[in-house]
Amino acid sequence: MELDLPYFFDTKLKKFSRAMEGGPGKPLTLLIHFVIIIFLFIFGKIKMDTAGISSGGPAIILLSVFWAATLIFWIIIKAGIRDTKVHINIDATGIEMLITAKQKNTDRKLQMMMLLVFLFTFKGGQWSSWESSVKWKKVKKVIFYDQKQEILIKGGPWDIRIPCDENNYQSLSDFILERVKKKPVKRVS
């Protein structure tokens, strides 16, 4: 099947995708974080019980509590609030992943929250939308997951994972292979 350009389609991403794809991270990675947090909390408690309040125990406990709160807040935003519906645009110049109006509204609110945090603390960062695009000449690597019918494109500020179905996977794969001839390509069955 030939791909008519520009090619547009809507798809839905996984809730727990990698952080480079706009998600909170894989469940195993998040579990490892929580195990380390629990270990730090227990270690701080033991240190405080044996060496007293003037030891490093309270600081370790405080660190573990802040780390846990940050991680929980991160998961709520990235896996709970984030809208996983996206619109994929593919044309002769590159590929673009557009987010929904609901997600743009959420991003705008989070940007305002980050600005308020900065104004009150003179610390804090920024919030950026996870809309992504990459020109074909800027693509660094493409991974085709034949079994899952997914294509992962690396090269932009965010990685773009394209979940396909049996109707468009082969035509998209052929088109992308044609566009990234001299780039590293990997196939995973």
Image (cartoon, rainbow, N blue to C red):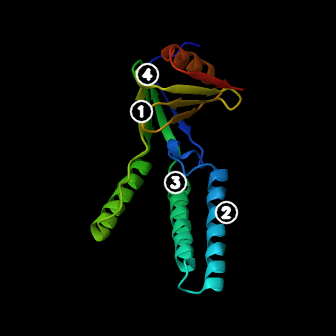
Spatial CA distance of label 3 from label 1 is: 20 Å
Q: Which residue is mark 1?
A: 133
Q: Quadrant of the N terminus?
A: top right
Residue under the point 67% across and 51% down: 28
Spatial CA distance of label 4 from label 2 is: 40 Å
Using the image, determine if residue 24 lies above or below residue 66.
above
Using the image, determine if residue 7 lies above or below residue 53.
above
Using the image, determine if residue 55 lies above or below residue 87.
below
Q: Position of residue 13 (x, y in %)?
A: 57, 42
Return the disc, 3 or 2, that comes first in the chain's sequence: 2
Return the disc, 1 or 2, that comes first in the chain's sequence: 2
Number of the front mark, 4 or 2:
2
Observer-nearest of 159 and 1? 159
* Label annotation for residue 78: 3
Q: Position of residue 40 (x, y in %)?
A: 62, 69
**Amino acid type, mark 4:** Trp
Q: Is residue 167 visible?
A: no
Return the disc, 3 or 1, that comes first in the chain's sequence: 3
Q: Which residue is mark 4?
A: 136
Q: Residues within 10 Å of mark 3 (few under 14, many from 20)?
A: many
Q: Is residue 116 visible?
A: yes
Observer-nearest of 177 and 58? 58
Spatial CA distance of label 4 from label 1 is: 10 Å
Q: How many marks?
A: 4
Q: Residues within 10 Å of mark 2 (few under 14, many from 20)?
A: few
Return the disc, 3 or 4, that comes first in the chain's sequence: 3
**Amino acid type, mark 1:** Ser
* Label annotation for residue 35: 2
Q: Position of residue 98 (x, y in %)?
A: 43, 38
Q: Residues within 10 Å of mark 1 (few under 14, many from 20)?
A: many
**Amino acid type, mark 2:** Val
Q: Are marks 3 and 1 in contact (CB under 8 Å)?
A: no
